[in-house]
Image: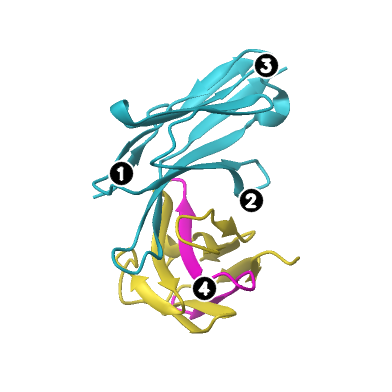
Amino acid sequence: AQKVTQAQTEISVVEKEDVTLDCVYETRDTTYYLFWYKQPPSGELVFLIRRNSFDEQNEISGRYSWNFQKSTSSFNFTITASQVVDSAVYFCALSGTEPFSGNTGKLIFGQGTTLQVKP
Amino acid sequence: DAGVIQSPRHEVTEMGQEVTLRCKPISGHNSLFWYRQTMMRGLELLIYFNNNVPIDDSGMPEDRFSAKMPNASFSTLKIQPSEPRDSAVYFCASSPLSGGELFFGEGSRLTVL
């Protein structure tokens, strides 16, 4: 069975601090995909990044960076120099592919980490 | 381009009433997902379709819930009869390809009194 664990329920930091959101996953699939989504107070779900299981390169996008380590089944997300606008709930998610058809498998979300950035 | 469109955005109904939530996926996307979000249970996958065919409905809470996708551009999630514990935000999402990102609608907030 697939499972995503975000152990940090809530994190509070002061603006300009760096913060890392942890994500640990479980899957038996050899091909799978990992995602991060952001849900600001307005409620919509905003896609941040997708990684496939064969690409362990770390990725940086502006103040955001992601560290994917298959050896520890982790896909952590770091925000550098946090800003008040980063305050949101962040979800890590995992999907596989349907066997034989190769179609999209179900996307399973972690419980989310609420990040509060104080001015 | 239009994103995933859900209706209604808000629904308030009384226990026992039938509720129908609607979703129009992004044109060309071949996977469609229904999720429910509550404080207690987080984001739960209810059901998903590939090429209009239901693939996994194991997340549907009980027989009161049903979902259909009669064509590639429309899906419904129906609750009959509704109960207060069904109160939640229901999200529809679509995806263009295997392992691709999901594009979410703005959600339908359901309150059952």
Cα distance between the residues tagged 2 and 3:
24 Å
The colour with which the image depicts chain B is: yellow
Both marks 1 and 3 on one chain: yes
Q: Residues within 10 Å of mark 1 (few under 14, many from 20)?
A: some
Note whether B65 is above or below A51 in the view shown.
Answer: below
* Residue under numbered circle 2: A44
* Residue under numbered circle 3: A81
Q: Position of residue A52 (x, y in %)?
A: 44, 44
Badge 2 element: loop
Cα distance between the residues tagged 1 and 3:
30 Å
Cα distance between the residues tagged 2 and 4:
26 Å
Query: Subunit of mark 4?
Result: B
First in sequence: mark 2 vs mark 1: 1
Q: Which amino acid does label 2 sit on?
A: Glu
Quarter of the image for residue B105 reads bottom right
Of the residues tagged 2 and 1, which is closer to the observer?
1
Q: What's the residue at 53%, 36% (across, down)?
A: A90
Q: Which amino acid does label 4 sit on?
A: Glu
Query: Magenta residues, as a range?
Result: B16-39
Q: Do the residues labelled 2 and 1 touch (CB within 8 Å)?
A: no
Q: What's the residue at 27%, 49% (across, down)?
A: A29
Q: What's the residue at 23%, 46% (across, down)?
A: A28
Of the residues tagged 2 and 3, which is closer to the observer?
3
* Residue under numbered circle 1: A3
Q: Can residue B65 be seen in this view?
A: no
Note whether A119 is above or below A70 in the view shown.
Answer: above
* Residue under numbered circle 4: B14
Badge 1 element: strand
First in sequence: mark 2 vs mark 3: 2
Badge 4 element: loop
